[in-house]
Image (spheres, helix red, strand yellow):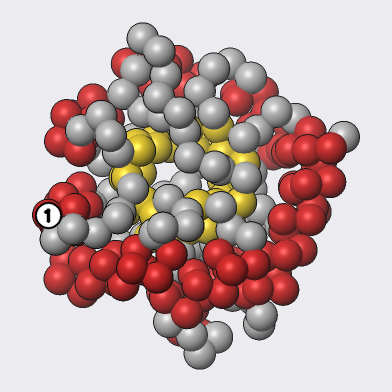
Amino acid sequence: MTPRPAPDLRLYLVTDAAQCAARGRTVLETVTEAVDAGVTCVQLRAKDTDGAAFLQEVLDVCAAVGERVPVLVNDRVDVFLAARALGSRVAGVHVGQRDLPAVVVRRLIGDGAYLGLSASTPEEVAAAEAEGACDHLGIGTIRATATKTDAPTGLGTDGVAALAARTCLPAVAIGGITARDLPELAAGGLAGTAVVSAICLAENPAAATRTLRAAWDEGARA
């Protein structure tokens, strides 16, 4: 099966509403500043938010930045489908190993939407490639992170790069990543890196984004 093209994963923002609020901003404000400064893909995550509120957030963010970068919905296939039914430019879904199976999600969202899948072991990476349902992988974690309490043990940059090398699917590193990690990850063959706190908790999301993009581009040129 010929892989579908993945989104631009170079700097992939995963949102955390509580972190944004701690800095006095909404998710929409944070995402808009980050995209203006160089974020290339956005994943909206709202584990503890009711469906209607999350749907409105998806609609608002897609209206603001959906024409410039892909906006993916974390886990909630129902919210993705509702947003699409309302005419939103929402681009896809990201699921984990404990969510709906990727092959089922692909049937639900159709071939025209992006589908990302989290993976943290050689077996999970191999299964994802064999199934042919997803467009890209989120591999990690790099190190322990407070934003995902059920995350696997940290693999380090070398461990994540080794897993990414086992698949032809584009892979983005996830989990506790800082700007210091980006040059090594870019040079190690990753397609991109996903961050939460590095932008959502930043005093200035735009400045933080520019620092992260510069660090990634440095490694990509190596």
Q: Quick one: 173 or 217, which is closer to the camera? A: 217
Residue at the spot 55% in from the left edge and 86% down from the top edge:
23
> Does 171 appear above or below 2?
below
Residue at the spot 56% in from the left edge and 74% down from the top edge:
33
**Quadrant placement of the N terminus:** top left
- Percent of width and height locating residue 135: 41, 29
168 relative position to 43: left or right: right
Residue at the spot 34% in from the left edge and 63% down from the top edge:
62
- Percent of width and height locating residue 158: 73, 31
Q: Quick one: 18 or 2, which is closer to the camera? A: 2
> Does 41 appear above or below 104?
below
Q: Quick one: 29 or 88, which is closer to the camera? A: 88
Residue at the spot 36% in from the left edge and 51% down from the top edge:
72
Report which residue position mark 1 lands on.
85
Tag 1: amino acid: Ala
27 relative position to 176: left or right: left
65 relative position to 79: left or right: right
Mark 1 neighbour density, 10 Å: few (under 14) some (14–19) many (20 or more): few
- Percent of width and height locating residue 134: 36, 28
